[in-house]
Amino acid sequence: LDGDGVVPEALLYGGAGLDSAFALVSSAILETGHVPAPWRTGAMRSVYKKGDVTRLLNHRGVVLSSHIAKWFERILLPRLLAATTGVDELQAVANPGVDVRAQLHLLYDVDLANGGVWIMTIDITRGFPSTSRDLTIAALRRHGAGGRLLRAIMGLIFDTSVVVGMRPGVDTEAVSLGVGLLEGAVLSPALFAYATSGLLDALRESDLGARL
């Protein structure tokens, strides 16, 4: 069950009537950019990891988002990728033809060619929640997104909120999120990739950093 109370089975078995209704709603969103509030509201839940169950740090917060919104986002995502220029050639998200498998094969080839390879990983703390929406929209425009598609994406990522589960069946009031991309949303990984697409180019042009 997601934040708007719709279970996936309702979408799977809703039939032609549901498909027609969803098509009408989707067309209206593309025309107006107005997205229903439940689609922009995440439901935060605490998932126990390990250790003392009474310690907050032994739980991980996950955000559940609307199944209907995800349905709509899955329609938008291929249109976004088709309408925009690609991100960095080595980026595995928002880069048609490149995925994690392609990156693994690339690392394997480098390893064979050099007799070994060092890998450094960088984890951006709270990457999605701290991403500037204005920066994201500017990046999308720079990559060629516009018109109804961009209007619908803006309707999805602005004025978002989250409710926090206190106990089964009881949530807090919706808390407005002033910044960031909604965790759990289908579009968020691609939008994050576009927002950070200039980072690798800037690093290369700066001629800074370490090379091993």
Image (spheres, rainbow, N blue to C red):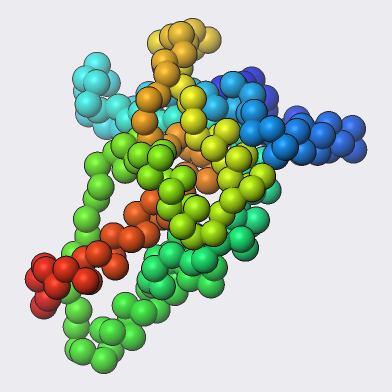
Q: Position of residue 104 (x, y in %)?
A: 38, 73
Q: Residue at x 33, y 81 (%)?
A: 108
- Name the residue at the bottom extreme: 113
Q: Is residue 153 visible?
A: yes
Between 146 and 164, the one nearer to me in the picture? 146
Q: Residue at x 30, y 27 (%)?
A: 59
Task: Please give left or right for residue 96 compared with residue 91 in the image.
Answer: right
* Residue 167: quarter of image: top left
Q: Position of residue 64 (x, y in %)?
A: 50, 30
Q: Residue at x 49, y 25 (%)?
A: 159
Whether residue 198 is situated above or below residue 124 in the rendered picture: below
Q: Residue at x 28, y 60 (%)?
A: 199
Q: Is residue 128 visible?
A: no
Q: Position of residue 188 (x, y in %)?
A: 47, 44
Task: Please give left or right for residue 4 compared with residue 193 in the image.
Answer: right
> Which part of the image, by quadrant, shows the N terminus?
top right
Whether residue 189 is situated above or below residue 53 in the rendered picture: below
